[in-house]
């Protein structure tokens, strides 16, 4: 991995950490309501950059954008079962910020995986609520769990 990529990942992790910590400091425990609005703005931004078509958004195009265009992970595996949605992220770029936020017990409000899950559920006309995120160091995966109502 080149030095520029390492620096970019460090900056991205730092930004995710700082934004989440600042939002929590200002808004408090209800800061998670910002996640859905962030998802809307991310889709608008990706559309403005010709990465996705917000008028014809699909799970496949969103997955391609997160993996190939943005390089946020090697794969995303999304599944639902009994009112829970699970998003497994293979080789995530944003592991350090997520681990630090969890360690400090700061709710994760703005992160690509939360945004991804909310957009997927919007496409499916469902509502998702973030529950937890876990990191598997041995396999270098994060698993994001959401409650889902359709």
Image (cartoon, rainbow, N blue to C red):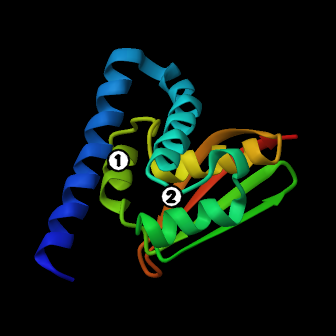
Q: Please, what secondary structure does the residue beneath circle 2 have?
A: loop
Q: Quadrant of residue 11?
A: bottom left
Residue 44 percent coordinates (x, y): 52, 39
Vertically, is 61 above or below 100?
A: below
Left or right of 69, for residue 26: left
**Residue 103: assigned label:** 1
Q: Callout 1: 10 Å neighbours few (<14), some, many (20+)?
A: few
Q: Nearer the viewer, residue 150 or 136?
A: 150
**Residue 51: assigned label:** 2
The residue drawn where x is 35% and y is 44% is 101
Vertically, is 132 above or below 63?
A: above
Residue 47 percent coordinates (x, y): 53, 47
Residue 39 percent coordinates (x, y): 55, 39
Q: Nearer the viewer, residue 103 or 81?
A: 81
Q: Nearer the viewer, residue 111 or 119?
A: 119
Q: Is residue 142 visible?
A: no
In primary-sequence order, the first of circles 2 and 1 is: 2
Left or right of 45, for residue 63: right
């Amino acid at each position: 991995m080149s030095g520029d990529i390492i620096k970019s990942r460090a900056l991205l992790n730092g930004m995710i950490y700082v934004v989440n910590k600042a939002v929590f400091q200002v808004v408090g425990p209800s800061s998670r309501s910002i996640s859905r609005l962030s998802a809307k703005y991310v889709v608008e931004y990706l559309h403005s950059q010709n990465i996705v078509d917000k008028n014809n958004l699909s799970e496949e195009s969103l997955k391609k954008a997160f993996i190939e265009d943005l390089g946020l992970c090697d794969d995303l595996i999304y599944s639902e079962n009994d009112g829970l949605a699970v998003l497994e992220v293979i080789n995530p770029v944003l592991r350090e910020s997520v681990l630090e936020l969890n360690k400090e017990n700061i709710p994760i409000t703005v992160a690509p995986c939360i945004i991804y899950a909310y957009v997927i559920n919007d496409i499916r006309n469902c509502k998702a609520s973030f529950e937890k995120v876990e990191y598997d160091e041995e396999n270098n995966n994060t698993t994001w769990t959401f409650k889902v109502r359709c």
